[in-house]
Every structure is written in C-alpha cells, then in structure tokens.
C-alpha cells in the first residue's frame, strides 16, 4: 500500500517534491480556455434550419387555430368516437374543458410566433 504523503519514503531519505502543480495555482496562472470555434454552417444547413423553423411556426399556428375553434363546434361532441362513450362525451362537452383546449390553442400560437420573432441566423 502506497501512502501519498511526502513522509512515506525510506527513513533518513529526504522527501521528493510533488511533480504535479497545484490545480488552483495553475488555474490562476493560465489564461481561461477558449471555446472551440464552430465551423461555418453550409448553405444547405442554413436553409434546412430556416425550413424547420418555418414548418414549426406553420404547424403551431394551424394546430392553435384548430384548438381555438374546434371545441366550440358541434363536431367536437357529435362524432363517431364519442357516441359510444357517454361519460367521456359529457367531459368533453363541458365548458371548462373546451376553454382549456382553446387556451392551449392560444398558447400554441404564441409559442410558434415567439419562435418566429426570435429566430436569428448563426453568426
């Protein structure tokens, strides 16, 4: 078993200095590490990013509008899926549930347009 203390050598022998520099001393004396430089994205990558942001905004806007309007139409409760489940139909036809769905639609539109307004190209 080796003991890392400087007094672990043979008796009568002077301890050898630690070859490792102190981590705090080295950190104070050396300049901070520079972040890795990112390579410039190709034009294809830039256009793919633009297209993905555009599609995200488009899908968010369409889904948001559907969630705002659809809960207040008769198709919301008078559909084939809910006719066989009367308990679920009563929950879905509740005004609170409809308002919750419309609120999610507003939130979806807001997130999509926030993403569009805060879009910026990589520099």
Image (tube, rainbow, N blue to C red):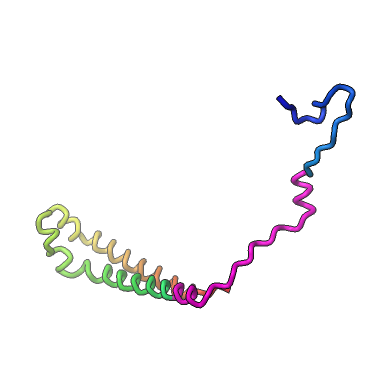
**Residue 84: quadrant of the picture:** bottom left
The residue range painted magenta reads 22-50
From the viewer's perspective, tell me whether residue 50 is left or right of residue 90. right
Residue at image point 77% right, 49% down: 26
Image location of residue 68, percent across then percent down: 27, 69
From the viewer's perspective, tell me whether residue 17 is left or right of residue 55. right
* The one of 83 and 98 positioned closer to us in this rendering: 83
Magenta-drawn stretch contains 23: yes
Q: Quadrant of the C terminus?
A: bottom right
Q: Quadrant of the N terminus?
A: top right
Looking at the picture, does residue 1 appear above or below residue 19? above
**Residue 103: quadrant of the picture:** bottom left
Image location of residue 77, percent across then percent down: 15, 63
Residue at image point 77% right, 52% down: 28
Q: Residue furthest left?
A: 84
**Residue 5: quadrant of the picture:** top right
Residue at image point 24% right, 63% down: 98
Image location of residue 30, percent across then percent down: 77, 55
* The one of 20 and 27 positioned closer to us in this rendering: 20
* The one of 26 and 68 positioned closer to us in this rendering: 26
Image location of residue 61, percent across then percent down: 34, 73
From the viewer's perspective, tell me whether residue 78 is left or right of residue 98. left
Magenta-drawn stretch contains 113: no
Residue at image point 22% right, 62% down: 95
């Amino acid at each position: 078993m080796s003991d890392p203390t400087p007094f672990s050598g043979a008796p009568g022998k002077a301890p050898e200095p630690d070859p490792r520099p102190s981590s705090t001393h080295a950190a104070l004396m050396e300049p901070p590490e520079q972040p890795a430089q990112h390579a410039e994205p190709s034009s294809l990558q830039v256009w793919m990013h633009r297209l993905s942001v555009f599609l995200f905004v488009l899908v968010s806007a369409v889904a948001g509008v559907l969630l705002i309007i659809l809960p207040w139409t008769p198709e919301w409760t008078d559909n084939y899926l809910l006719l066989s489940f009367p308990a679920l139909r009563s929950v879905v036809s509740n005004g609170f549930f409809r308002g919750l769905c419309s609120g999610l639609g507003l939130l979806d539109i807001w997130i999509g347009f926030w993403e569009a307004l805060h879009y910026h190209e990589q520099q």
